[in-house]
Image (cartoon, grey):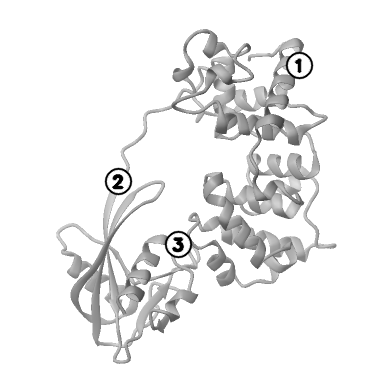
Amino acid sequence: MREFSDGAIEVIRKNLHGWFMRNKRCFPWRKRRTTYRVWVAEIMLQQTRTDQAQPYFERFMRAFPSLKKLAEASQQDVLKQWEGLGYYGRARKLHQAAQIIRATPGGRFPTEYEKILALPGVGPYTAAAIASLAMNLPHAVVDGNVIRVLSRLCMVEERLDTATGKKIFQHLADQLLDRNNPGLHNESMMELGALCCLPRRPLCESCPLNTCCEAYRNHGVYDYPKRNPRAKVPHIQVGAGVLKDGHGRILIAQRREGDMLGGLWEFPGGKREQGETIRECIRRELMEELGVQTDIQDHLITIHHAYSHFTMELHAYCGRIVSGKPRPLECADLAWGGPNDLMAYPMSKADDRIRQHLRQHE
């Protein structure tokens, strides 16, 4: 396995840390740094770019300025503040972890890596980030940015998604880690990957590590990191019913806890099966989900949305119940409300677009 010489490690650390201090970006979670703020930020940044996360982080901190406030909040309030950020399982696990921490003697965030790692929603990268940034504990982070830097620096031929590849990248990161300043070092590595060692157009000429980079020296920067070919992303058609009663109220359903987007509210419906029209799909789904016969009428809006593992066309149609009383047969709960009332419920981006359309055309 590749080993850095002591001299190379010293040069890399010196150049990297100096570059970071001159070029680091200003983020809200880098101000008034506390363990709680670092933790919330790292959970948000698991699946979200830093520029996208900033307004959500600030909003979340205003709503829940402390671990205690987060633990005492309802899950619905937490999901509402997370609304629009996506990957809602992060919010549910963050809330669950806050409640677990508050229930322990002392009610304080753990200060040992293994105990941090045991919290819901925390993996090795997140635990290392919290431990180093908030507590200055010597644990090296390995995220996508760090992998890209290391793979080019050392021309790592192993694919990053293999068990061997993961061990190699962790080994290299551990070697380079400045154990006296682990937080500074980890932030420097991640910032270099985010600002300089870019996936498609790396800024090699201005990189502080270009004199140490094997891929740059061998004109092979674009060949790293090694990846498997991406699988084709499936595309699905989904129908949703916007059901109104005689008072103009609209019916929404809450997703079950263990389902995708669990805890969020939606306009009831589901995936179109082969041979179905969208109207047929919506009628079938509403019978299965709510136990009602419906008359599906005019098309309202079609929404195109991409998730990490599939893309979707969501077709919303107006409708009314012709027989039966809605019951939560395949959902957690039901609620009725006018377009403005529905704003109080946490929804996914796709369902929120239906909600906003209803408000605009009320």
Q: Which mark is first along the chain, 1 or 2?
A: 1
Q: Amino acid at mark 2?
A: Pro
- Which residue of the protein is positioned furthest toward the right in this rendering? 106
Indicate the quadrant containing the N terminus: top left, top right, bottom left or bottom right. Answer: top right
Label 3 crowding class (10 Å Cα cut-off): few <14, some 14-19, many 20+? few
- In three-dimensional space, the C-alpha distance between marks 2 and 1, rounded to whole angstroms, equals 47 Å
As drawn, 139 above or below 56:
above
Taking the spot 30% from the left edge, 83% from the top edge, the residue there is 244
- Mark 3 lies on a secondary structure that is loop
Residue under circle 3? 259
Question: Residue 326 lies in what quarter of the image?
Answer: bottom left
Q: Residue at x 67, y 59 (%)?
A: 97
State the image coordinates of residue 31 (x, y, percent, origin top left): 72, 49
For discs 2 and 3, the disc positioned in front in the rendered view: 2
Residue kind at label 3, given as amino acid type: Asp
Mark 1: which secondary structure?
Answer: helix
Marks 2 and 3 sit apart, C-alpha to C-alpha, by 19 Å
**Which percent across, then down, holds residue 338?**
38, 83
Task: Nearest to the eye among marks 2 and 1: give it.
Answer: 1
Residue at image coords 74%, 66%? 68
Q: Which residue is mark 1?
A: 10
Task: Return the x and y of residue 318 as percentages of the image width and height.
Answer: 24, 76
Q: Is residue 283 above or below residue 110?
A: below
Residue at the extreme bottom:
246
Counting residues from the start of the chain, the first of labels 1 and 3 encountered is: 1
Q: In the image, what residue occupies the spot 34% across and 36% down?
A: 231
Kindly identify which residue carries mark 2: 234
- Please provide percent x and percent y for residue 204: 53, 18
